[in-house]
Image (spheres, rainbow, N blue to C red):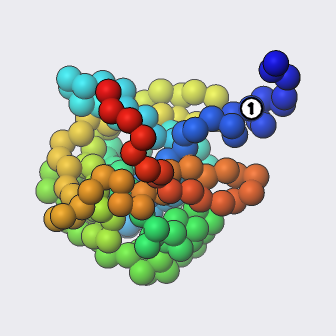
């Protein structure tokens, strides 16, 4: 038997919601924002998207520069995820506050985050306004990964806004 529950509660039951750190730069101003809204849109060309609310400082930086870098996070970056999801780059330098190191991108001017296991460099090819967020669709121009990294090494996978907890990827249970 299934029962009706509030929409917001129902969405929290889904097994998704990875967390990422998105880095940007425009006119020498670098910033990082914690995001949950990330999606894979196309294989060829390789397109991903990030949903950013217009009130964010990062929104202006992406609009103006037309670039961003999606950085994956693991357990070691939990404090950085908190800082970058709480403070605005309008008031603080989040690279400094979160003790993260900007590393020049290979194909974009936006910085990658050195401490992140995987960085994906993107150039904006389209903007889509959807509800309270704008989705910046980006073509993936380059990707970098820490040497020796295995994709499921403690990646932060699910966050639930109500309880504020983070969970990591579980064990392998099958093969397709
Ligand atoms: C777990 C988590 C996920 C978030 N996901 C998003 C998101 O997908 N899009 C967004 O615009 N803001 C998201 N936020 C909120 C921003 O990270 C937050 O407002 C941040 O302070 C904005 O920084 P900025 O003004 O420097 O860009 C999220 C926050 C947290 C903690």
Question: Can residue 123 be seen in this snapshot?
Answer: yes
Query: In the picture, residue 109 is in which quadrant?
Result: bottom left
The foreground one among 63 and 46 is: 46
Quick one: quadrant of the N terminus?
Answer: top right
The residue carrying pointer 1 sits among few (fewer than 14), some (14 to 19) or many (20 or more) residues within 10 Å by Cα, namely few
Q: Residue furthest top?
A: 1
Question: Can residue 58 be seen in this snapshot?
Answer: no
Query: In the picture, residue 140 is in which quadrant?
Result: top left
Task: Kindly identify which residue carries mark 1.
Answer: 10
Q: Residue at x 51, y 69 (%)?
A: 78
Quick one: quadrant of the C terminus?
Answer: top left
Q: Is residue 60 above or below residue 153?
A: above
Residue 87: image x %, image y %? 60, 68
**Left or right of 123, for residue 11:** right
How many numbered dots are placed on residues in this image?
1
Q: Is residue 56 above or below residue 43?
A: below
The foreground one among 148 and 117 is: 148
Q: SS for tag 1?
A: helix
Q: Residue at x 58, y 38 (%)?
A: 15
Q: Is mark 1 within 8 Å of ligand 1?
A: no
Q: Is residue 28 above or below residue 22?
A: below
Query: In the picture, residue 137 is in which quadrant?
Result: top left
**Left or right of 89, for residue 14:** right
Q: Residue at x 47, y 27 (%)?
A: 128
Residue 145: image x %, image y %? 21, 58
Residue 55: image x %, image y %? 61, 49
Q: Residue at x 30, y 62 (%)?
A: 117
The foreground one among 166 and 67 is: 166
**Left or right of 71, for residue 1:** right
Q: Is residue 117 above or below residue 7?
A: below
């Amino acid at each position: 038997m299934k029962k009706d529950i509030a929409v917001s509660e129902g969405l929290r039951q889904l097994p998704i919601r990875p967390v990422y750190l998105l880095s940007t730069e425009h006119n020498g101003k670098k910033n990082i924002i914690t995001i949950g809204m990330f999606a894979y849109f196309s294989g060829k060309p390789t397109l991903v998207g990030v949903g950013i609310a217009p009130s964010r400082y990062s929104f202006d930086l992406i609009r103006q520069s037309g670039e961003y870098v999606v950085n994956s996070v693991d357990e070691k970056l939990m404090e950085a995820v908190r800082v970058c999801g709480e403070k605005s780059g309008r008031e603080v330098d989040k690279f400094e506050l979160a003790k993260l190191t900007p590393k020049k991108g290979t194909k974009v001017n936006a910085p990658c985050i050195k401490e992140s296991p995987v960085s994906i460099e993107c150039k904006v090819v389209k903007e889509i306004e959807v509800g309270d967020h704008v989705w910046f669709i980006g073509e993936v121009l380059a990707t970098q990964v820490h040497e020796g990294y295995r994709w499921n090494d403690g990646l932060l996978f699910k966050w639930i806004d109500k309880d504020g907890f983070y969970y990591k990827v579980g064990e392998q249970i099958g093969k397709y």
